[in-house]
Amino acid sequence: MSIEQHNIARNTVPTRENRLNTITAYVGTGNEIEGKARGGCLLQQDRRFSQSAACAEMMPLCNSALIDGNVVVAHSPVGCSGMLSVINIIGKAGRLMRGMPAQNARSISTNLSEHDVVYGGGAELEKAILEADARYNPPAITIVTSCASGIIGDDVDSIVKGVQPRVKATLIPMQCEGFRSGVVSTGYDAFLSALLQVIDLPKRKRQDTLLLINPLSISRPNEVEIERLLQLLGLKAQWFPLFTDFANVRNAAETAGVASLCSLMSNYFFKQFKDKFDVPFVEPPMPVGIEFTDWWLRDVGKMLGIEDRVEQLIESEHARVRPQIDELKEQLHGKRAYIGFNLEKSLSLQSLLLELGIETVVSTGFEYSDAYGLDRLENLNKRCSGNYTLHIGNFQHFEWAHLFNREKPDMLVGGLELGGAALRQGVPVAPVLPGTFYLGYDGAVNYGKEIVKSLRNTAFSRNLAERVKLPYRKSWFKQKTHKYIGRSEP
């Protein structure tokens, strides 16, 4: 489905399976997936067994909760908004880091019942919107749909149009029923695309300002590092849309260009943004480590016509941090790591680990698309053997456990999702959490020091592994990791 086939009437975005041929099931080497992608034969493989999966609905739900002043109306059974309890913690910490007062994420659920599923939930949605406006007096209310509301067939856009004249807040419907896509980042498309409805036509252009998409996994220390680099280039950063007020959402098109710190999140939005407001964009890898930070800066510099300034900055930053990276490399040389994140972050961290002398044995992603994976893979495979295992799977914990058992890495470089599986098998964790500083040149040095610190004392993971019984039979570990992917194999 092309960009032009966006369903304007229902404000739905095309799924990533249709738009980008995104796959969610693969186990093989980095070289293999690069070769198949280049040959046009990297196809989606069915899973005969799936343990769990993240839902695309949680992306607009959780991200819109972090727009300052916004209230989220979850048009769903109450359980669908359960993730907001975790986002509430991330949101409070993020606000304090940015000098904002701690505040709970503001949300209301329509709490759809069996009665609503049979007779329709339109009345409940209308009541929830009016309650959100009266209770919080917010500048904006985002309305996030769910599987239940999609199955009912509630005409959310018409309900929102009918209620809008009765409330002060700007209402923003976000259509992302979880069953529509097995690719969780389709939810990112739904979230950012919906915000296009409320971005104003620019009255001026700020040629010294770059719009930056900040995913919820990027903490304030990382933003500060990017701001530092841009300031050295004579540029300002305008963050969009998290932890910023609604006025900054509205004036986003006044900027000279747009870039992302995670192109996995913003691929669809960039094209729409350029079509509507004629704002240029770039989609480099995450600026993690020396090589990928150089890449990110050069793409920004080319877009804005400041290539000479960028090269001068890169030269001076290399001279400053290279000795520190080399010192860390001596301490970490020969270590083997398992990287566990979404693919964009995993491959960017893999680039940094290469620079630190750490071998990657497994790199994971919840999905793969050539649009935000192939050029990164080509770069990495030229710099290493390309024989590391690349695992694509949407939260398949049993496959993670299998790979930990098979490879026995020295550490996990990962987040909360894989931490438990690693520790229970005696693998220490060098965590990348919502507060971790790892972007840019200073982030590379800082995170290298964090890895050294994590490996100093591994007693906790060893002791835990000795006392925890894994829920897997020995026969599972003797089989192939990809046993349940594609055709049946012994």
Image: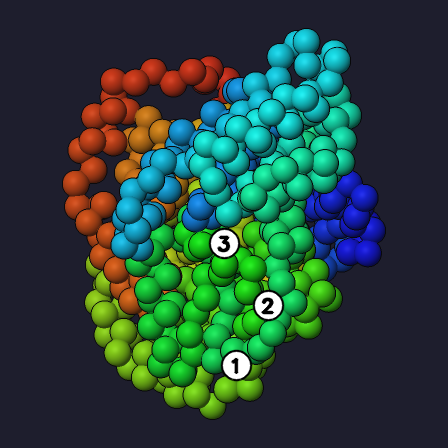
Q: Earlier in the sequence, mark 1 or mark 2?
A: 1
Give the number of marks: 3
Marks 1,3: beta carbons within 8 A: no
Q: Secondary structure at mark 3?
A: helix
- Identified by mark 2, the residue type is Ala
Q: Is residue 312 visible?
A: yes
From this view, report whether residue 390 is shown above or below residue 34.
Answer: above
Rendered image: mark on residue 253: 2
Of badges 1 and 3, the one in the foreground is 3
> Which residue position is annotated with label 1?
207
Q: Earlier in the sequence, mark 2 or mark 3?
A: 3
From this view, report whether residue 7 is shown above or below residue 118.
Answer: below
| Residue 354, position as x, y percentages in the image | 39, 61
Residue 472 falls left or right of residue 392: left
Q: Secondary structure at mark 1?
A: strand
**Residue shown at the point (40%, 29%) measured from the top left:** 85
From this view, report whether residue 397 is shown above or below residue 434.
Answer: above
| Residue 43, position as x, y percentages in the image | 75, 44
**Residue shown at the point (32%, 84%) measured from the top left:** 316
Furthest toward the bottom, the residue is 308
Q: CA distance from mark 2 to mark 3?
A: 13 Å
- Identified by mark 1, the residue type is Gln
Rendered image: mark on residue 74: none
> Which residue position is annotated with label 3?
246
Marks 1,2: beta carbons within 8 A: no
Q: CA distance from mark 1 to mark 2?
A: 11 Å
Within 10 Å of the Cα at label 1, are there few (<14), some (14-19), or many (20+) other Cα atoms?
few
**Residue shown at the point (57%, 19%) measured from the top left:** 111
| Residue 92, position as x, y percentages in the image | 32, 41
**Residue shown at the point (75%, 21%) measured from the top left:** 152
Q: CA distance from mark 1 to mark 3?
A: 21 Å
Q: Quadrant of the C terminus?
A: top right
